[in-house]
Image: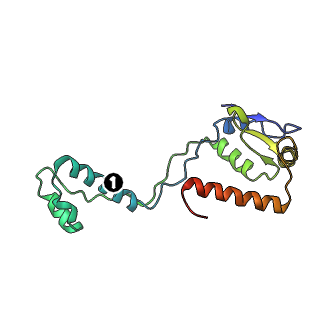
């Protein structure tokens, strides 16, 4: 994916392309895995139970508490209950190179640079904060696109929109 330095003096670090070129959907791997696995295990157990229920037609175990369920499962000659428990947290392998981590930290702490997405799917770009604000205000002041409303006109428009939306949703105002 591409990265474009649109700052006036090209002040974004040249190596930023290697990091920002990964795209805005790239997710940095956290340093450690999640500590709360209980919900995940409960979800797996529930999904498994539902699958067995619809596959076998036997639903006796659905009303059992945890102890009864363990006893029920241990009746099978093929089932051996494991005593293994995963660690609460473990170190995850990073999906960034060391220089990319340093660069990410540098860019996150730079108050001057902003990295918005460009249009037409051309990837992220670098602009200064002042450039960004100036471009936003220029766009919002374009009278061909926007009308400046009085407060009363804005309130009336909101009320009309609420009536329209509630009407479409079948609700009442």
The quadrant of the picture occupied by the N terminus is: top right
Q: How is the image coloured?
A: rainbow
Does 27 sit above or below residue 46?
above
| Image quadrant assignment for residue 167 | bottom right
Q: Give the position of the C terminus as an image quadrant.
A: bottom right
Q: Position of residue 18 (x, y in %)?
A: 68, 35
Foreground pick, 168 / 8: 168
Instruction: Give the quadrant of residue 86.
Output: bottom left
Mark 1 residue element: helix
Mark 1: few/some/many CA within 10 Å (<14, 14-19, 20+): few
Give the tally of numbered discs: 1
Q: In percent of the image, x 20 and y 68: which residue is there?
A: 67
Query: Which residue is depicted at the point 12% across and 54% down?
Result: 76
What residue is shown with label 1? 44
In this view of the protein, which residue sits in the foreground, 49 or 114? 49
Where's residue 28, x and y in %? Answer: 58, 46
Q: Residue at x 24, y 56 (%)?
A: 82
In this rendering, would 137 be left or right of 96? right
Q: Quadrant of residue 65?
A: bottom left
- Is 14 left or right of 95, judged from the image as shown? right
The image shows residue 54 at horizontal and vertical percentages of 22, 49
In depth, the one of 78 and 162 nearer the eye is 162
Judging depth in this view, the residue of 118 and 80 nearest the camera is 118
Spot occupied by residue 89 in the image (x, y as percentages of width and height) = 45, 58
Compared with residue 8, is residue 87 higher up or lower down, i.e. above or below?
below
């Amino acid at each position: 994916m591409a990265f474009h330095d649109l700052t006036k003096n090209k002040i974004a670090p040249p190596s930023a392309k290697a990091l920002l070129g990964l795209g805005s959907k790239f997710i940095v791997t956290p340093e450690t895995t999640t500590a709360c696995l209980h919900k995940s295990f409960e979800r797996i157990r529930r999904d498994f139970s539902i699958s067995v229920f619809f596959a076998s037609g036997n639903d006796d175990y659905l009303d059992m508490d945890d102890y009864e369920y363990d006893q029920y499962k241990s009746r099978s000659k093929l089932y051996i209950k494991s005593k293994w428990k995963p660690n609460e947290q473990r170190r995850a392998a990073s999906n960034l190179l060391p220089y990319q981590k340093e660069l990410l930290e540098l860019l996150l702490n730079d108050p001057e640079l902003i990295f918005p997405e460009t249009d037409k799917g051309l990837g992220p770009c670098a602009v200064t904060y002042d450039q960004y604000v100036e471009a936003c205000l220029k766009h919002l002041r374009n009278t061909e696109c926007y009308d400046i409303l009085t407060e009363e006109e804005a309130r009336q428009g909101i009320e009309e929109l609420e009536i329209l939306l509630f009407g479409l949703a079948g609700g009442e105002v």
